[in-house]
Image (cartoon, rainbow, N blue to C red):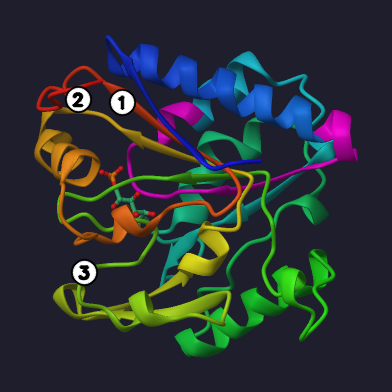
Amino acid sequence: MPSTRSIEVLATAADLYHAAAEEFVRAARAAIGAQGRFTVALSGGSTPKALYSLLASNYASFAWDRVFLFFGDERHVPPTDAESNYRMVNESLLTKIVIPAANVFRVKAENSDAAAAAADYETQLKTFFELEAGVQNEDFPRFDLILLGIGPDGHTASLFPDSEGLKEKSRLVIANWIEKFKTFRISFTFPVLNNAREVMFMAAGADKADIVHQVLEAKNAPEFPSQRVQPSDGKLLWMLDEAAAAKLTSR
Ligand code: 6PG
């Protein structure tokens, strides 16, 4: 399947979340139809929360027993912490649907050793995707869908500008030191992001308009981490509201 990039602009943030929920469910139905299961990595931050709430309210009866949920990144905090991506997903989605606990793969970010938490999560991925060491195409998991956001500095997942994690080529999950926050983040690496069947970025609001324009329309070499998300054999979909798309010169 050749790689494609498409940009969808919705009038409002609410329209964006509805369209993103429909795309989530479309991808899930396609994967379950084809393989009997749907593997998805969720993004953190504030933007996707409304999507998760919408999935819980409008798709509560979906075949969640066939859905396997992972996290593209996590803050180095316990699952009860207000900063925790798991907590946000748990409150907006997991507590409102019926999904087997065994289908939810959480980063054990309560572990004070961030590198150990990352290594543990990598093992969870390798076990679930039955990855065989050393066999090329099986070095990296192939998610059906990976959700991503974008920060004003162009970071995505927890791959921030000037961070060591940008250079990682073989590991699946890393503990990435983020100098500006003086903390580690646990994050998927680019090889995992770029091995997905589909990557869906979501961005809403005027404060994202500058970076969205730079990332999608910059003519020079990739400068921002988000620009390096280029699925090698998959679909790249940017879902934007009008405010986030305001500075795009072409759509
Ligand atoms: C995180 C995210 C991160 C997020 C961006 C955008 O854990 O924070 O994975 O990459 O997507 O920072 O965040 P907002 O949606 O809050 O603007």
Element marked by disc 1:
strand
Which numbered dot is residue 240? Answer: 1
Magenta span includes 5? no
- C-alpha separation, residue under disc 3 versus residue under disc 2: 22 Å
- C-alpha separation, residue under disc 2 versus residue under disc 1: 6 Å
The part of the chain drawn in magenta is 32-51
Pick whichever, 47 or 245, lies toward us: 245
The x, y position of residue 181, in whole percent, is 19, 73
Residue at the image position 87 percent from the left and 28 percent from the top? 33
Residue contact between numbered discs 2 and 1, judged by CB atoms under 8 Å = yes
Residue at the image position 35 percent from the left and 59 percent from the top? 228
Tell me the crowding category of disc 3: few under 14, some 14 to 19, or many 20 or more residues within 10 angstroms, Cα based.
some
Taking 224 as reference, is 203 above or below it?
Answer: above
**Total tally of numbered discs in the picture:** 3
Magenta span includes 40? yes
| Residue kind at label 3, given as amino acid type | Pro
The x, y position of residue 218, in whole percent, is 15, 46
Residue at the image position 38 percent from the left and 11 percent from the top? 15
Residue occupied by mark 2: 245
Queried on whether the Cβ of the residue with tag 3 lies below 8 angstroms from ligand 1, the answer reads: no
Element marked by disc 3:
loop
Residue occupied by mark 3: 161
